[in-house]
Amino acid sequence: IPEAAPVAAARAGRSRTEDVVLSDTGREGVWELRVDTRHPTLFQRPNDHVPGMLLLEAARQAACLAAGPGGIVPAEASSRFHRYAEFGSPCWISAVILPE
C-alpha cells in the first residue's frame, strides 16, 4: 500500500483520490508511481508485477499533470513495454510537453 501522498485528484484528471496513482517527487515532470493492490479496477487479479493497465493510467495522469490547469484530456496513446515494473522498487513516471 503506498505511503506517499497522492497528488490532488483534479490535477491528475481524476475526481476521486482513490484513483490517483502518482505522488509528487519535488522534481518537475517526474512523479512516483503509487501501487495500491486493493484498487478494484487496476488489480482485478493477483499479479507478481505492476500491471500494464496501472502504468498506462500513470502515463495518462502524468500527461494531465504536465499540461497543468486547463490542460488536456488524453484520448489516445501508443505504448511499448520493454521490461516489468516490480513491486517493492520505485517506479518513476515522467512527462514533458513537446513544442508544437
Image (spheres, rainbow, N blue to C red):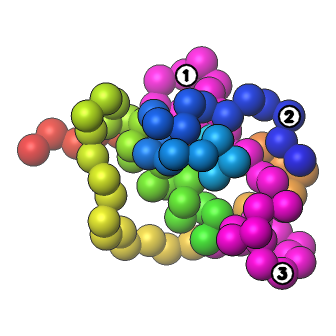
For numbered disc 3, what is the local secondary structure? loop
Three-letter amino acid code at the position of disc 3: Arg
CA gap, disc 3 and disc 2: 22 Å
Image location of residue 26, percent across then percent down: 60, 18
Q: Which mark is residue 98?
A: none
In the image, 93 versus 46, the foreground residue is 46
The residue under the point 33% across, 30% down is 68
Q: Residue at x 31, y 65 (%)?
A: 75
On the image, the x and y values in percent for residue 49 come to: 82, 69
Looking at the image, residue 39 lies above or below residue 62? below
Magenta residues, dominant SS class? loop
Residue 72 lies left or right of residue 79; in this view the side is left
Which of the 4 image quarters holds residue 71?
top left
Magenta extent: 23-52
Establish if 55 lies above or below 89.
below
Q: Which residue is mark 1?
A: 27
Indicate left or right for 13 with 27 as reference. Answer: left
Where residue 3 is drawn, which disc sits there? 2
What is the residue that sits farthest to the bottom in this orientation?
45
Mark nearer the N terminus (1 vs 3): 1
**Which residue is pictured at 74% across the width and 29% down the height?**
5
**Relative to the observer, which residue lies in front, 83 or 13?**
13
Q: Gap in Å between the C-alphas at discs 1 and 3?
A: 33 Å
Count of number-bearing discs = 3
- Amino acid carrying label 1: it is Arg
How many other residues sit within 10 Å of disc 2, few (<14), some (14-19) or many (≥20)?
A: few
In the picture, the disc for residue 45 is 3
